[in-house]
């Protein structure tokens, strides 16, 4: 007898309750979007893709502090069972600004995604894992290879410079004719 309230969902369903992560080259964080909701800013959908693709599907939030290095967030794992997207934002949860987004990493099997960005010390970055559907995922957040100026690696660009998509990279690069 009596009234009761049943709350279903996930703890990190909204930006304000993002789970804080420390970049690590060890075990992934296991997550799920199964009980998550679609994220919006005000009345509009959240958008973090150069192609203008909105978030669309339900997502869950993580945060990471900038380390003055190149960070990488990835759902490329055999434990990811749906077509994921990753969006990284900076700012506050009330005024998010897109840093980078990816909807498919061609090097991943099964629809995993990965993004890299230079994470400035003193800034907080919000990582939204979402997708076209819902499911379970393994999220790795770590320092990307070649994140230090002390060990630059050659980086070769080919093709028409007008068509090269911008990506943050620390190191030397050469334009191959």
Image (spheres, rainbow, N blue to C red):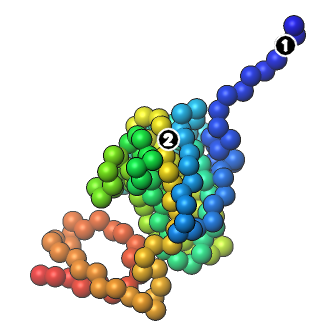
Measuring 38% from the left and 85% from the top, which residue is drawn there? 171
User: Going by the picture, which residue comes out furthest to the left?
Assistant: 177
N-terminal label among 1 and 2: 1
Q: Does 165 sit above or below residue 68?
A: above
Task: Give coordinates of residue 92: x percent, y percent.
Answer: 65, 56
Task: Give coordinates of residue 59: x percent, y percent.
Answer: 53, 41
Task: Give coordinates of residue 160: x percent, y percent.
Answer: 16, 71
User: Going by the picture, which residue comes out furthest to the top?
Assistant: 1
Quarter of the image where the C terminus is located: bottom left
Q: Which element is circle 1 on?
A: loop
In-front residue for pair 25/62: 25
Left or right relative to 107: residue 115:
right
Q: Residues at badges 1 and 2 in contact (C-beta under 8 Å)?
A: no
Left or right relative to 16: residue 5:
right
User: Going by the picture, which residue comes out furthest to the right?
Assistant: 2
Instruction: State the count of labels.
Output: 2
Q: Does 69 sit above or below residue 136?
A: below
Quarter of the image where the N terminus is located: top right
* Separation of marks 1 and 2 at Cα, in angstroms: 33 Å
Measuring 22% from the left and 77% from the top, which residue is drawn there? 157
Location of mark 2 (residue): 136
Location of mark 1 (residue): 3
Which label sits in the foreground, 1 or 2? Answer: 2
Quadrant of the image occupied by residue 163: bottom left
Quadrant of the image occupied by residue 144: bottom left
Q: Does 81 sit above or below residue 167?
A: above
Q: Residues within 10 Å of mark 2 (few under 14, many from 20)?
A: some
Quadrant of the image occupied by residue 3: top right
Q: Can residue 114 be seen in this view?
A: yes
């Amino acid at each position: 007898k009596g009234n009761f309230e049943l709350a279903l969902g996930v703890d990190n369903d909204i930006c304000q309750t993002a789970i804080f992560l420390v970049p690590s080259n060890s075990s992934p964080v296991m997550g799920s979007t199964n009980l998550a909701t679609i994220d919006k800013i005000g009345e509009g959908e959240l958008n973090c893709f150069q192609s203008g693709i909105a978030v669309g599907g339900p997502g869950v939030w993580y945060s990471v502090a900038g380390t003055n290095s190149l960070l990488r967030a990835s759902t490329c794992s055999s434990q990811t069972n749906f077509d994921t997207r990753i969006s990284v934002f900076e700012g506050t949860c009330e005024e998010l600004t897109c840093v980078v987004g990816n909807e498919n990493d061609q090097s991943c099997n099964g629809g995993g995604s990965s993004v890299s960005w230079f994470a400035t010390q003193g800034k907080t970055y919000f990582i939204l894992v979402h997708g076209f559907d819902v499911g379970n995922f393994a999220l790795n957040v770590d320092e990307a290879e070649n994140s230090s100026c002390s060990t630059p690696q050659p980086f070769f660009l080919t093709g028409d410079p007008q068509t090269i998509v911008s990506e943050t990279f620390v190191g030397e690069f050469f334009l191959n004719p």
